[in-house]
Image: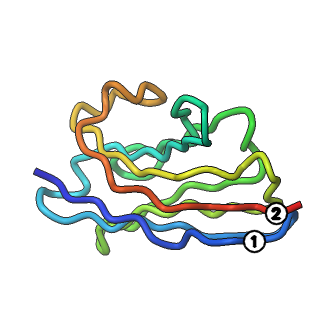
Amino acid sequence: QVQLVESGGGLVQAGGSLRLWCAASGRTFSNYRMGWFRQAPGKEREFVADISRGGASTSYADSVKGRFTISRDNAKNTVYLQMNSLRPEDTAVYYCAADASGLAYYRDSKYDYWGQGTQVTVSS
């Protein structure tokens, strides 16, 4: 079992930045691919970014590419999402997720554990 707790959400003006982090506990953190997803009101949950177990490989949704950066510190059991140049359409609840297989990538149904989410609101 892996427990995930997201933090760092808040209210920010368009063009601003926020850094989210997700602290993991339970099993060995470095055994899991980690992903960030988001869900806006009235919309389906969507992939944002993911990072491989060692951190060498990352991928991003086209909508955030060049603005968001995912990273991880396995010594601290934490994954981060640096969000720059935020837009109102980035407003959503952001979730981190852990994938034991290492093969989930953008597929939310393949992730094994989820956090409770943190709200990000970007005002225009």
Question: Is 13 in front, or is 69?
Answer: 13
Could you tell whether 68 is left or right of 55 in the image? right
Name the residue rendered at 69%, 61% in the picture.
121
Question: Is 73 in front, or is 11?
Answer: 11
Amino acid type, residue under disc 2 in the picture = Ser
Amino acid type, residue under disc 1 in the picture = Val
Name the residue rendered at 53%, 73% in the picture.
8
**Disc 1/disc 2 C-alpha distance (Å):** 6 Å
Q: Earlier in the sequence, mark 1 or mark 2?
A: 1
User: Which residue matches tag 1?
Assistant: 12
CB atoms of marks 1 and 2 within 8 Å? yes
User: Which residue matches tag 2?
Assistant: 123
Would you place residue 82 above or below residue 41 in this image? below
Return the x and y of residue 57 as percentages of the image width and height. 50, 42
Secondary structure under the numbered disc 2 in the rendered image: strand
Question: Is 120 in front, or is 64?
Answer: 120
Would you place residue 90 above or below residue 103 in this image? below
Return the x and y of residue 40 as percentages of the image width and height. 61, 42
Few, some or many residues within 10 Å of mark 1 (<14, 14–19, 20+): some
